[in-house]
Amino acid sequence: MQDAAEEPAHPGDLPAQATCTSPVGDQSAAAIAERTGGNPFFIKETARLLDSEGAQAAATEVPAGVRDVLRRRIARLPAAAQTILAQAAVIGTETDTGVLGEVAGADENVLLDAIEAGLLTGLLTEPAAGRIRFAHALVRDTLYQSLSRCAAPGCTPGPVRRSSGTAPARRRLSPTTSLRRAPIQ
């Protein structure tokens, strides 16, 4: 994992750190750097995915090694924090804490403890007061993809069903925010 004092990789540094057998274009390198937050381990694993399965997989899937590491980190969080972070993943990459609180329906102290746990473990960042953001798209995607799916005929998949409850809170608390569910990137 990346040392706290170490600078994140820049898109131009990707080919030197990646294990791709073919050249990586600037656009793909920039997309991988954005998706991984510049984390060298995440870059290396995403580059391996790019090499083995192509650009579409690298842009939309979480590499198995990264997913395993993130799942272990998430599993160490209290159950309430895991649930609230999963709800944040449905809302999008970044959200207002008021929107998250309303969607989660959690007591304010439980919400703040969950956010603090996410911040302390490096899963979340706080770009501004009252806002949280996933540290990497891969963190959000791991949480989002871990949500259970409904298997009954005619049942709406879990994340889509859950995201429908975010619209009223987002509209009331962030009227300029798009009400569409943020796609997994």
Image (tube, helix red, strand yellow):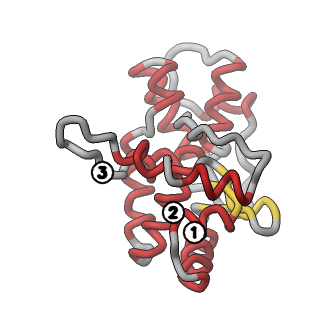
| Residue 161 left/right relative to 88 | left
Secondary structure at numbered mark 3: loop
Residue 105 screen position, x and y as percent: 51, 72
In the rendered structure, which amino acid carries the disc numbered 3? Ser
For disc 2, the marked residue is 85
x 49%, y 59%: residue: 87
Mark 1–mark 3 distance (CA, rounded to whole Å): 21 Å
| Residue 123 left/right relative to 151 | right
Number of the label disc, if any, that sits on residue 118? 1
Residue 115 sits above or below residue 149 on the image: below
x 56%, y 53%: residue: 166
Secondary structure at numbered mark 2: helix
Residue 74 screen position, x and y as percent: 43, 64
| Residue 106 left/right relative to 7 | left
Question: Would residue 126 be visible to someone looking at this image?
Answer: yes
Number of the label disc, if any, that sits on residue 99? none
Which circle's residue, 1 or 3, is located before the other in the chain?
Answer: 1
Residue 117 screen position, x and y as percent: 56, 75
Residue 58 sits above or below residue 184 on the image: above
In the rendered structure, which amino acid carries the disc numbered 1? Gly
Contact flag, marks 2 and 1 (Cβ < 8 Å): yes
